[in-house]
Amino acid sequence: MKRLKFNKANCIGCQLCSQVCSAYKEGEYIPSKARIAIETYYDKGTLKYADHFCILCGLCAKACPVEAIHVTDHIEVEMDVCCGCGLCQEKCPKNVIKIRDEKAYICDTCGGDPKCVKTCPQNALTFE
Amino acid sequence: MTMLGYQNKVLRINLTEKTASTEPLRMDFAEKYVGSKGLAIRYMYEELKPGIDALGPDNKLFLTTGPFTGTPIPCSGKLSVAAKSPATGTMNDCSIGGHAGIRIKFAGYDMVIFEGTLDKPGYVVIDNGTVEFKDAEEYWGKGSHETEAALAEQYGLEYSILSIGPAGENLSNMACINSDYYRQAGRGGIGAVMGSKKMKAILIKGTGGVKVPDITKATDRILEILHEDVLQEDNTFVFDCGTTAFLEACNDGGILPWKNFSDTTDVQWTEYNGDVLIQHREGKRGCGSCGLGCGNFLKIGDAVCEGPEYETISVAGPNAGLRDPYIIVKYNMVADDVGLDTISAGDTIVWAMEMTEKGIHDFGVKFGDGEGMIQLLRDMATRTGAGADLADGVKAAAEKYGGMDFAMQVKGLEYPQYEPRGSWGMALSYAISDRGACHMRSYAPNAEVFEASIPPYTPEGKGQLVYDLQEFNAIKFSLCICDFWGTISYEIMAELLTLITGREWTVEEMSEVGRRVINIARAFNQREGFNRTHDTVPKRVVKEALQSGPAAGQVIPPEAFEDMLDQYYEVMGWNKDGTMPEELIQSLL
């Protein structure tokens, strides 16, 4: 199964990934609602990386009490079943799930052809 | 009237009253000046009364985004920071990288305007729709890096921070504003304007979005342009080595300054070349919405910087008679931290070195004294010892101590690191630049030296060349596109602006906006009393022939310089004395 991979040595922290994600998923350039959040920052004279992206571990599906989350080669959330309890968000090891209006928003790797990977200008994101 | 791509909203903050209000963006201005640089200058023309004190409460600080800010259009993450300049008395717009511009847009604003002055040191926190005024006594006197680190610890990563160092607090004409530690709005004393308002820092958090007419169509096309136009070799060199690449090109072209522009070319340039510096690189970093990633985060011993850029390598290297990579990086770090523009501070110090060596006045520093150079940065920022005499830049110091013939400045802004005797168009660029000697208004060495498509040692054709370059940058920067997307065309600019705003823009209109931006800046300066007599060249450039390198023997005859000015004014439709016809000014409003 292909998964998103992040090579921080190539990342320039431009956040084009999350801008493009929000464009296709939310109809607006709004990174705060994107399904991926990768940024770089300086902390005490060191360059650091925060990489929040789905690794298809499936822990969210296991945590879901109403079986709204399905994992195949990508994740699907049945929005009319999702109860917005947030248990998936609590279990997500990459802290990438967002709960809004009592619904869980999870990366679906664009159904197997992730736009963030197509966007990444320095090939820091790959799908393999 | 509103337009997509914009937030159609201005946040106006009155520091004297500690109040904040919002108002619609002047879309009549946006129609004519688009955004960022151009929009800021139009607002300055409207709101800054003639003759005001640049360091008084009547000056305003304008943070201006553009329609591309916050979109995934590559290289669109920069922010225009503008005010009347205390160094020159002209308008001054700077461009700062990092993420602050995008966060202002996502907070819901196209612009933030700061008016008045705080009664005591403070900082301002903008969190989407709220504005708070905080006490900054504990940060006053601290370096920019320490201040940003402390505020980042307190507020978290969602905030962008703009801050000043002691140089801004002490109102140095060379004070800059820092963001993301290593990015600067550098020139014209913009940090002193912030300091005069007793504003140590500005924090911005924005979690909203930007809407465009057809987001799928726009994003699909943006991605095509990213991969087909942006990510090509002519641009991607900035990821490989950043502007360090210019060192070899400038040295080979005879325009790398040596010892305060007394000569050019250094046979030992490889000692501090990019490949030497990049061995110390720990990572790459770009601005928000970048794509190219010019920033070289590197460390040599205790010296850390994101860069160093060519300008800094030159001024803390051969222009100071130095060849030490450690000194270059340390100079860069200390200048950023104390909040001084590396170009202006450097030119002022290397002038002081020449003054000392010539025995005109002893500033306690000579060519080759790297530690002395770095100490002077600290002393200029705090106005201590010799630093007190140098803190307001080379023009102010030369007015006091002499040496004006080799004070490398125009209108009080120090020369960037491209020797004009090897690229005559650059003498014109510096002379007619709206904020004094600037290499970002128009950049002649590409055509004259690197590509050698036009002869460098002649006035012929330089008026048109400089105008064409200036027009291109004026619209490009009004769209807040970074300089490093060098291959962007008028066609791409018009196409992207159409996609983002939904209004059809033509290539001709892009050209018209560029010309208008140059003119409104000139109109502002004319209102402040500027004319041909201020469009000058340092005497050294028209009196002393270069001794070394490919441009050896070159000097720009005064009549050739005047010829270039005549040509440029004619292209602009200005009068012979450099003033603008009244009907031209009226057409801009």
Image (spheres, coloured by chain):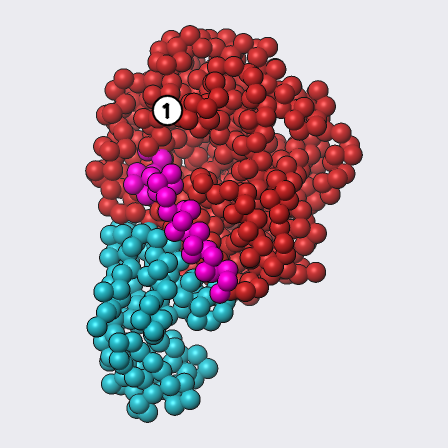
Residue A106: in sight, yes or no?
Answer: yes
Instruction: Say which of B81 and B86 sits in front.
Output: B81
Residue B2 left/right relative to B285? right
| Amino acid marked by disc 1 | Cys
Q: Is residue B69 above or below residue A73?
A: above
Q: Residue at x 42, y 41 (%)?
A: B484
Most extreme residue toward the bottom, as rendered? A66
- Answer with the quarter of the image where residue B331 lies: top left
Identify the main secondary structure in magenta.
Answer: helix
Q: Residue at x 37, y 24 (%)?
A: B250
Locate the N terminus of chain B by quadrant. Answer: bottom right
**Residue ID for mark 1:** B250
- Answer with the quarter of the image where residue A72 lies: bottom left
Point out residue B127 in the picture as x, y percentages from the top left corner.
50, 63
Locate the C terminus of chain B by quadrant. Answer: top right
The region drawn magenta spans B216-244
Q: Residue at x 34, y 66 (%)?
A: A114
| Callout 1 secondary element | helix
Please give the letter of the chain rendered in red.
B
Point out residue B443 in the picture as x, y percentages from the top left corner.
49, 30
Chain for disc number 1: B
Point out residue B522 in the picture as x, y percentages from the top left corner.
65, 32
Residue B207 left/right relative to B3? left
Q: Is residue A77 above or below residue B349?
A: below
Instruction: Say which of B338 and B286 sits in front.
Output: B286
Q: Colour of chain A?
A: cyan
Question: Is B238 inside the magenta-drawn segment?
Answer: yes
Question: Is B366 inside the magenta-drawn segment?
Answer: no
| Neighbour tally class for label 1: few under 14, some 14-19, many 20 plus, Cα within 10 Å | many
